[in-house]
Amino acid sequence: MAVVLLLAAYLISVVPAQKGRISGGKQLTSLRNSYCWAPTWSPDGRELAFVVAPRLEAAHPGLSMAEFVKALVPGNVYGPPAGAQVCTMSLADKKVATLGSGWAPLWYPIKGALLYLEQASERRYPSGHLRGQFAWAKGKARGGEVRLPGPDVYIECCLSPDGRLLAFVAFHEPYETVVGMADLESGKSQQLAQGRIGLTRLAGWSEAGDFLFYLSEGVLYRWRRDSKKVSRVAAGVGLANPGAVAPKGDRLVLAGRLKRGKAQWEWELPVVNSDSGKQQVIARLQNGRVQEALWQPHGDWLAYAGEDDKGWRLELVSSDGKKHKTLVHSRSPLHGLAWSPDGRRIAYVVGGPIYLGEPPGPFRPDGQLWWVKTPAPRQPSAPSPQR
């Protein structure tokens, strides 16, 4: 299955797309000679934090299948780009402020507090990652009572809703990663899992912060905060692309898996019951893939960014799969989806360095930040997969 996914990713990455305009959404940034990456909303929804890096001077050279696999396996989760800067945008006046050199901005759930990773070593690992240490970009929580974990090669991080726990995936040589949990009050940490790099990802916290979900080697796991125990939820849910947790923690949407259909390859988008592990496919892409998926805060709409032979789409779908709505269509990559805290807008990036092979014709190296309005959370559908 892993070989099939790698082959599909390789083919998709080198398929040329036709030129076309972007329909839907509104552009927020017009940065020159640079690109945006990884937008994230402040808890009050008034600011966006994101990474800005110098624009690539030239496209990546075409890769053979062997070169692609060598690049993808350790680098499926991209390391920080050279010259990365952490920035914020005030959504009231659209002004951009540069906070400092670093990457992976992370809002602490106290007004005005923002964390990010700054470089702690000159060594860049084969995966493209750097050893980083946490720094306060603005504000400081609880008078210095927060004990941030030490320098490490962090791949992704996720704060619990109350800001007391930090879940993370960190690089572990050779070509492996660990899922860890750091208690920011006691300073203690717990290792939850270990797996191959690119195949271990965080899915996120439940809204109440009582459960953390993560994927490792195609299996979905749940960590319980009260008992600090890990249980297996479901297998065969996909190998690399992350998903998101429903507000109540009873279901998850995952960015999917590749399966052979009757006449062609299909990429399935499943919703998984977190108790029974039962899965319900709510969307399928023919000869394409889903890059990432989100669950609407306080609601029941799901959003995903996907690519097929017609280009990229940002799509909404109800959790029972009965309602679909295309928000954005683009010939350039759509990625970095982030839903606003009130569930009414999605921020995302159009363009940027997402292809490892030769980029298609309309590829935009100057990735810009956009946003689009979404329906207000109104619970359009409720049923979850039956046990």
Image (cartoon, rainbow, N blue to C red):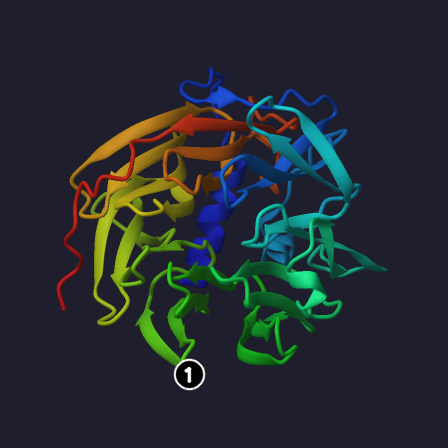
Residue drawn at x 62%, y 71% is 184
In the rendered image, the residue lying farthest to the front is 143
Residue at horizontal 75 percent and vertical 24 percent from the top: 33
Say what secondary structure mark 1 lies in.
loop
Residue nearest the observer in this picture, 355 or 153: 153
Left or right: where does residue 112 sit relative to residue 323? right
The answer to whether any part of residue 264 appears in the image is: no
Name the residue at 53% across, 35% down.
Answer: 46
Quadrant where the N terminus sits is bottom left
Question: Label 1 belongs to which residue?
Answer: 229
| Left or right: where 13 falls relative to 231 | right
**Horizontally, is 313 left or right of 281 in the view?**
right
Q: Residue furthest right?
A: 122
Based on the displayed image, in which of its 4 quarters is residue 77 positioned? bottom right
Name the spot of residue 381 as percent of width and height, x first.
16, 45
Residue 91 visible somewhere in the drawing: yes
Which part of the image, by quadrant, shows the C terminus?
bottom left
Q: Residue at x 33, y 66 (%)?
A: 236
Against 361, residue 75 (above or below) is: below
* Residue 146 falls left or right of residue 195: right
How dense is the environment of label 1, judged by Cα within 10 Å: few (below 14), some, or many (20 and up)? Answer: few
Q: Position of residue 335 (x, y in %)?
A: 50, 38
Q: Position of residue 188 (x, y in %)?
A: 63, 80
- Total residue callouts: 1
Viewer-proximal residue among 350 and 134: 134
139, 245: nearer the viewer = 139
> Residue 99's x, y, as percent?
75, 40
Q: Amino acid at mark 1?
A: Lys
39 over 351 or under it: above or below:
below
Q: Is residue 186 above or below residue 378?
A: below
- Observer-nearest residue: 140 or 378? 140
